[in-house]
């Protein structure tokens, strides 16, 4: 008893360190999203973060509106020109889409997109050193589950890492902890897209003999069943052939600015849809 | 007892404030690590039990809200607190340049642990992040730490004068 009293502080500190290490190893072993206390913290954070974000956003918007007014006429002309150009492109794509639909029908392909969207607002952007996450204002009571893909049309931005009752944490694709099976749209070569923080993504495990060029579009492969096939991930920004490596070093630029996310959509599973129906 | 009851709520507010400032001032490009400065300050001002709890709770909240690996910052913050606590006896806290250097060192230590963890567990490329993440963040903490220490000293003087 005397020993315990004497070493009380040391025991306490060792216990805290052991708890932290246990959490860490548990998380690495079984993944995130299982802690009751972390749900409580997320639940407490959500309303505060939402309130603060709304106030900050309104101030920022007012300031940006003032800034944007300067030179808006010039911008307007440019945009009108761009719209006319894009209209022509859209018509081309519509033709292509209709053709694909017809071919799909002919080949009797089944429709894989048996999903429904749950829309959510981004209430916080958390960027802790290497980890990149966001908080959204929907949780388990809205039908969200850990692991569900999160998208900003037309592409993928991450997956749900932790879900509480009214809020969820999204692990962005640019997080170093994030890996997703992907294919190069042009050549159908398969690789793994890993997050690289502010550098975007890195496409790994593509052999040096393969043809990958700057500008190639990268989409999800649908392997593993977590992410649906064909969702846009990004565009190849740089390809390097290293002498010492078996694989290409490919940098991929995201299609979206991750620091400006405001609304996102969560792809709920097909099972959920059936349940609701 | 009030200290232990209030600590989780204050930790949550601190982490939210930190992420909002990061978002507003640095547009998410750089990290404003206010919570780390608080942990360093706790090493200089609090006793071992209170300080360890503070570091643990703050790290846990930070992990829940911002971290992608639960437990990583909880562990690192307790280590940083202990480092700060044992170094505080040998450092002159009233000298601002010492606090700046010590803040810089602690932030460096924190990022080193994070990067090493990512490298060992996720086989992650270290060198790029030394320039992109580690150096800007350590510089910010190094600049922020003396300001925070100075402000807290003023607050302490204010309350001490009122209660005396």
Image: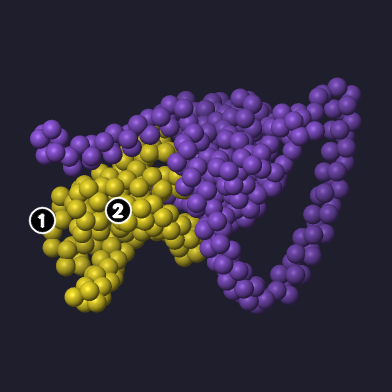
Chain colours: A purple, B yellow
* Distance between the alpha carbons at the discs numbered 2 and 1: 30 Å
Q: Nearer the viewer, residue A248 or A267?
A: A267
Q: Nearer the viewer, residue A23 or B101?
A: A23
Q: How many marks?
A: 2
**Badge 1, how many Cα within 10 Å: few under 14, some, many 20+?**
few
Q: Chain of mark 2?
A: B
Q: Residue furthest top?
A: A108
On the rendered structure, is A265 left or right of A167?
Answer: right
Image quadrant in which you'd find residue B121: top left
Q: Earlier in the sequence, mark 2 or mark 1?
A: 2
Percent x, y of residue A62:
62, 73
- Rendered position, B125 above or below A258: above
Q: Chain of mark 1?
A: B
Residue A257 visible from this viewpoint: no
On the rendered structure, is A195 left or right of B85?
Answer: right
Q: Secondary structure at mark 2?
A: loop
Q: Residue at x 71, y 28 (%)?
A: A271
Quadrant the N terminus of chain A occupies = top left
Percent x, y of residue B94:
16, 67
Q: Nearer the viewer, residue B31 or A5?
A: A5
Provide the residue designation for mark 2: B1
- Rendered position, A123 above or below A66: above
Quadrant the C terminus of chain A occupies = top right
Provide the residue designation for mark 1: B90
Percent x, y of residue A261:
60, 54
Q: Residue at x 48, y 61 (%)?
A: B20
Q: Nearer the viewer, residue B13 or A249?
A: B13
Label 2 with label 1: CB-CB less than 8 Å: no
Residue A41 visible from this viewpoint: yes
Labels 2 and 1 within one chain: yes
Q: Secondary structure at mark 1?
A: loop
Percent x, y of residue B67:
44, 44
């Amino acid at each position: 008893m005397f020993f315990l009293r004497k070493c009380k502080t040391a025991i306490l500190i060792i216990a805290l360190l052991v708890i932290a290490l246990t959490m860490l190893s548990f998380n690495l072993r079984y993944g995130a999203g299982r802690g009751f206390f972390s749900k409580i913290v997320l639940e407490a954070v959500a309303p505060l973060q939402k309130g603060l974000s709304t106030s900050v956003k309104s101030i920022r918007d007012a300031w940006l509106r003032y800034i944007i007014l300067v030179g808006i006429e010039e911008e307007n002309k440019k945009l009108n020109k761009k719209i006319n150009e894009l209209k022509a492109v859209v018509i081309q794509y519509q033709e292509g889409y209709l053709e694909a639909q017809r071919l799909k029908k002919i080949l009797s392909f089944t429709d894989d997109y048996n999903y429904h969207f749950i829309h959510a607002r981004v209430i916080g952007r958390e960027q802790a050193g290497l980890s990149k996450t966001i908080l959204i204002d929907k949780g388990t009571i809205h039908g969200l589950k850990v692991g569900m893909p999160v998208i900003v049309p037309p592409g993928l931005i991450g997956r749900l890492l932790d879900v509480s009752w009214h809020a969820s944490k999204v692990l962005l694709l640019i997080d170093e902890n994030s890996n997703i099976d992907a294919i190069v749209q042009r050549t159908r070569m398969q690789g793994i897209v890993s997050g690289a923080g502010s550098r975007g993504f890195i496409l790994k495990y593509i052999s040096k003999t393969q043809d990958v060029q700057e500008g190639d579009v990268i989409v999800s492969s649908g392997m593993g069943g977590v992410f649906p096939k064909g969702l846009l991930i990004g565009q190849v920004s740089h390809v390097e052939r290293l002498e010492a490596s078996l694989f290409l070093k490919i940098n991929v630029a995201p299609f979206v600015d991750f620091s400006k996310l405001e609304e996102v959509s969560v792809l709920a599973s097909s099972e959920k849809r059936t349940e609701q129906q | 007892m009030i200290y232990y009851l209030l600590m989780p709520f204050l930790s949550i507010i601190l982490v939210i404030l930190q992420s909002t400032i990061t978002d507003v001032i640095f547009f998410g490009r750089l990290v404003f690590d206010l919570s780390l400065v608080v942990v360093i300050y706790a090493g200089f001002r609090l006793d071992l039990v209170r300080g360890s709890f503070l570091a643990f709770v703050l790290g846990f909240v930070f992990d829940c809200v911002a971290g992608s690996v639960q437990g990583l910052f909880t562990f690192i913050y307790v280590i940083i607190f202990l480092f700060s606590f044992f170094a505080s006896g040998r450092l002159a806290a009233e000298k601002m340049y010492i606090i700046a250097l010590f803040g810089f060192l602690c932030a460096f230590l924190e990022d080193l642990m994070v990067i090493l963890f990512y490298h060992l567990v996720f086989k992650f490329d270290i060198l790029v992040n030394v320039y992109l993440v580690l150096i800007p963040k350590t510089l910010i903490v190094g600049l922020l730490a003396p300001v925070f220490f100075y402000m807290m000293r003023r607050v302490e003087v204010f309350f001490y004068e009122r209660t005396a």
